[in-house]
Amino acid sequence: MVVIDAGHGGEDPGAVGNGIIEKDLNLSISKYMENRFNELNIPTKMTRINDETLDPTERVTRIMDAFGPRADVIVISNHINASGGDGAEVIYPLRNNNVLSNLILSEIEKVGQNVRKAYQRRLPSDPIKDYYFLQRDTAPLQTIMVEYGFLDSPLDDVYQLKNFSNDYAEAVVKAVSEYLGVPYFPLDGTSIYIVKKGDSLWSIARQLNTTVAELKTINNLISDLLSIGQSLKIPQVEETPIISKPNIHIVKKGDNLYDIARKHNTTVTELMRINNLSSTLLSIGQEILIPTEAEVLPIEPELPSELPLVYIVKSGDNLYDIARKHNTTVTELMRINNLSSTLLSIGQNLKLPGTEITEPETPITQHIEYIVKSGDNLYAIARRYDTSVDEIKRSNNLTSNLLSIGQRLIIPTATTTITYVVKSGDNLYSIARKYDTSVDEIKRKNNLTSNLLNIGQILTI
């Protein structure tokens, strides 16, 4: 997941000179980047989409609200430098390593820009903290600041920034895709896969729904040997006319789960649940089942079978994937199967944890009307009424976090809560999915500072 931050904006123009206004070029680069990430099915949100003034608090709030305070969220803050230097540089937080930053500089250099360095900057008054508020206040996110060049450079930066800024943005998109292990395709539509440590032609073919023979043919390979960082072309799926089915969405180029959910008036969580998805990645031509009104009613619990549920191990399986697919943990699988190691053999029978019968509880939701006042933001309103930013946005069909004074908001307020006792094999993700809420919401409601749970622990849902 990527948050794109267009630096400066509104009353804060940033650096200005030689026909370049930083805030405008930052926004242009950010919009290009958002479009490309969407084409690659990488979930993306922006801090601003127009020429808007953002104070430090609001900018940080929007970054943190985008996907929540998660270490797997990447923030790309776009900037143009000034002070007479030359070339691109990247500043990364003290809490992170330089892998992604160096990847970005390497790709920018490939498209013709000089590069300076990737570095960290410490706060002089407290050297254990980051110098820039954007990185200091957004832990644990990986917040990277990219300076694409100097608008007062005595060399060729000014010309390059005016004519090749989209090339630099594309370079960042490619670097992030490689870092995330997401198949990348340039603007000509040719899909590219970057070989990672541990990859083989067989594993890549299986992951991308093709064959080893096809990969070797389109890449002119004469052997099965691969090298880390090697680019492989991916066979394209022919886009043929598809007859739509009732309540089915056919994934097209540029689709992502967030947009599909919004289009069909549902949530990403619900789409992942009814389609048994373990990640938000989609492939062109994939069929996504859309819930009908009947499908989102409370579901009667299934009675457990008298016989234990059994999974038969297939080629390529591992305990981690099996546990995640069946909503349990590796530890629980090893316990109920008396396993002393995580090694599996093809055809092996694994018992799966049975389903415990519970009475479904349906929270009753009411709404109040709230009129936005000066200084309000969604995060503060959500905290005041014990709800979430996403829930307020969903109830009001909001597509951004922007509010206007006098705006009327419908605020959902739950009148009942659920008390849940943690069982063996439970984790916050499975509990959140069961009760159609989020991990962050459960942690906030129960004042949890980590994802660790104890058997017998009581949670308020």
Image: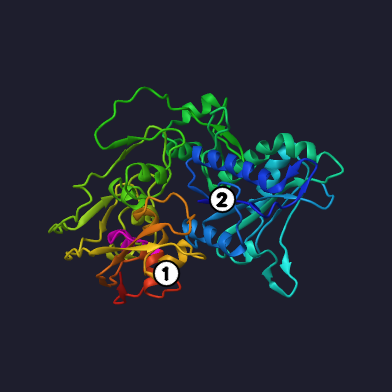
The structure residue drawn at horizontal position 44% and vertical position 30%, both measured from the top left corner, is: 211
Q: Quadrant of the C terminus?
A: bottom left
Residue type at mark 2? Arg
Q: Amino acid at mark 1?
A: Arg
How far is disc 1 from disc 2 in space, using C-alphas?
23 Å
Q: Is 192 a magenta residue?
A: no
The magenta stretch is 429-439
Residue 401 placed where, x, y %? 48, 55
Residue located beneath label 1 in the image: 383
As displayed, is residue 98 above or below residue 280?
below
Task: Give the residue drawn at x 68%, y 63%.
Answer: 132
Location of residue 354 in the rendering, given as x and y in whole percent from the top left corner: 21, 61
Q: Check disc 2 and report its element: helix, strand or loop.
A: loop
Residue 223 visible from this viewpoint? yes
Query: Can you give x and y, in whole percent of width and height, for residue 426 in the image?
Result: 32, 66
Which residue carries the number 2 mark? 48
* N-terminal label among 1 and 2: 2
